[in-house]
Amino acid sequence: MSFIAPAGTPLRLTEIASGMWASTRSDSLSELHQELARHAGVEGCWSFSSGRAAMVVALRAMTAVDGGKRRRVVIPGYTCYSVAAALENAGLTPVLADIDPATLSYDLASLERAVRGDTLAVISANLYGIPNDSPAIEAVARSAGAYLLDDAAQSLGATIGGRAAGGFGDVGLYSFDKGKNIPTMQGGALVARKSSLSAELEKQWTLLPKPAPAETVVNAGKLAAYSMLLEPSRFGFARSLPGLKLGQTPYELTYPITRYSSALAGLAVRLARRIGEFNATRIANAQKLRTALAESSLQQITPPAGAKPVYLRLPVLTRSSGQRARLINALEEAGIGATASYPQALGDVPEVRARLASDSQETPGAREIAARILTLPTHAYCPPDLAVRVREIVEKAD
């Protein structure tokens, strides 16, 4: 059965091969670093084995520059579990601030309560390609002398107020995992302006080992399989394969922290230069869905003023968790990859709750999002009639 993947970026085998081959004839890591730094409007960039590895290094660098005096880091009550796991790997204490379900950005009043003089950093989210209210978040972090880590793992190419997601605060983060704007199966990057923090990032990056050649070979094979299995006529089969862990959100602490593969960077450079093309397709498909669902029972997310989302997926809120379950079943039966995204607010994840600061707030907005959110595909494999099909399914399920 034909099945539209929940997220993805179509890749050609020839593109993968030529991109990786290009790394043998040029310094692909330097090219990628220059491309991402230029995009974010900063001077420095460092690439790593994954986005979560990049986050751990960023947090360790902040701690080193701070001298280890501050240990509290404010994170969104609803975001990827790897953010909280990165804090544990860096030996830091998570403090939750709530999220506004209408925008998926921080509830600013909750954020202001969470940030104190002993706060080391604030981490943003920018989920599904929708920018947070980054200027306001940046101002709150600055007022307390805290770092801001602008996590744009899902929002490469998005902007707010003319500035790139990932370009706010002290350091930004991008991810190259499967399903992201630039998918090379693994990889991530940090971007930052010149400062004592960027000098420490350079030091820590230099000390990291390079990836093992065998690992690059394995990832090249995974990329080839990804490029073939993402196509709708094959993705239904891919979903049935054991061990792929599609759609799972584990809390993981064990993963390599190395530099990024120069071979994969060759492909990433090519994809980075096509990011406008990829995102234009997602934006157009998201707009069709938003228009088709405008009069439906689903609540749409309102981006902050001045934001230009790129919609890695289109998130909407159902009336209830029951309606969401019915819709996911109906959409999947129709071959449309809808998801409930992260299954719990971070405050309800046992591994996170056990490590929260004692004065961490409850996050009802985050819980509401976890119970009601539904994401729809926007990538280039979406058929022209997807929006109409989704609307009909929603109307029938109601």
Image (cartoon, grey):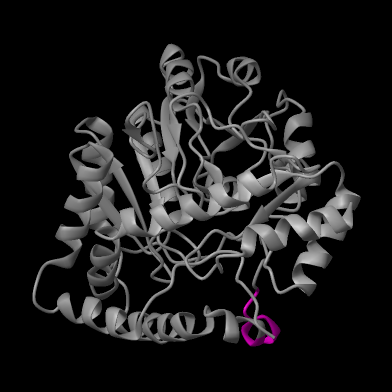
Identity of the residue drawn at 47% across and 19% down: 136
Quarter where residue 209 is shown: bottom left
Q: Residue 57: percent from the left, percent from the top? A: 38, 48
Seen from the viewer's position, the closer of residues 181 and 196 is 181
User: Start and end of the magenta stretch?
Assistant: 237-245
Identity of the residue drawn at 23% across and 31% down: 196
Left or right: 371 with respect to 183?
right
- Residue 358, visible in the rendered structure: yes
Left or right: 297 with respect to 2?
right
Instruction: Decide: is 150 above or below 327.
Output: above
- Residue 339, visible in the rendered structure: no
Seen from the viewer's position, the closer of residues 392 and 143 is 392
Left or right: 384 with respect to 19?
right
Q: Quadrant of the N terminus?
A: bottom right
Seen from the viewer's position, the closer of residues 118 and 50 is 50
Quarter where residue 388 is shown: bottom right
The magenta stretch spans residue 231: no
Kindly give the residue lying farthest to the top in the view shown: 143
The magenta stretch spans residue 244: yes
Q: Residue 262: percent from the left, percent from the top? A: 23, 70
Instruction: Decide: is 50 above or below 166.
Output: below
Q: Residue 331: percent from the left, percent from the top? A: 76, 65
* Number of on-image labels: 0
Quarter where residue 253 is shown: bottom right
Q: Residue 180: percent from the left, percent from the top? A: 46, 60
Instruction: Decide: is 159 above or below 90.
Output: above
Identity of the residue drawn at 50% across and 65% down: 255
Instruction: Decide: is 357 above or below 242.
Output: above
